[in-house]
Image: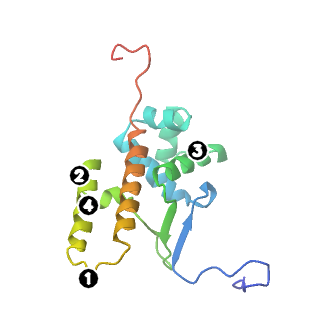
Amino acid sequence: MSKPHAGRSGRSAPPEAGFEHTRSWWEVPPEVVWAFVADLCDRDTFRGVAARVGVSPETVRKYVAGIGRPFLSTRKRFAELYLEHHPAGYAAERRAGAARRVQPPLRRLFPPGEEAARHEVRTLVMLAQRFPDEVPESAGPLLAWLEFQLAAEYAAEGRTKPRRKKNSPES
């Protein structure tokens, strides 16, 4: 099959850059969703993940273990959970003949904890602003964007913790 040409089918040709990006659950690769769910199960329990997605813990266990083939609705729920945890959507670098290099969440680039991460972002921007003749005007908006991204990622991560049942003795 040949590469589509701009204008022929009414669509423009895909960008030549080696990146793919989407906010559609359908276009998030299954192996990326699986790795995300497996990582989430390591940090939480099967029950916790199952409660977030609305499936049984056994379904989550089978999905992570690679037993059987999940229903499309189950795959959709897991992919939507992935997009909920990655507010910017799915982004990866295309690599010919190799696995995709998926962009890690921003919070993983900074020290653990939302306040520690925000402090480090502010420190980086402050250091850049020490040279006012050289710092671009985008430093302020970049700081706001980075803080928003961190807040969104930590908010999504905070919702993955198991919720207590109303009738449990701990509540």
Q: Is residue 89 left or right of residue 10?
A: left
Is 104 in front, or is 124?
124
Residue with the mark numbered 4: 122
Q: CA distance from mark 1 to mark 4?
A: 19 Å
Q: Residues within 10 Å of mark 2 (few under 14, many from 20)?
A: few
Q: Is residue 152 left or right of residue 7?
A: left
Question: Residue 110, percent across and down?
Answer: 27, 59
Which residue: 52% across, 46% down?
81
Label whose residue precedes the other's in the sequence (3 or 4): 3
Label whose residue precedes the other's in the sequence (4 or 2): 2
In what quadrant of the picture does the N terminus appear?
A: bottom right
Q: Is residue 113 visible?
A: no
Residue with the mark numbered 1: 133
Is 112 in front, or is 99?
112
Residue with the mark numbered 3: 77
Label whose residue precedes the other's in the sequence (1 or 4): 4
Please state which of the two labelled residues, at mark 4 or mark 2, is closer to the viewer. 4
Give the amino acid type for the residue marked by disc 4 in the picture. Answer: Arg
The figure's colour scheme reads rainbow
Kindly identify which numbered label has been placed on residue 116. 2
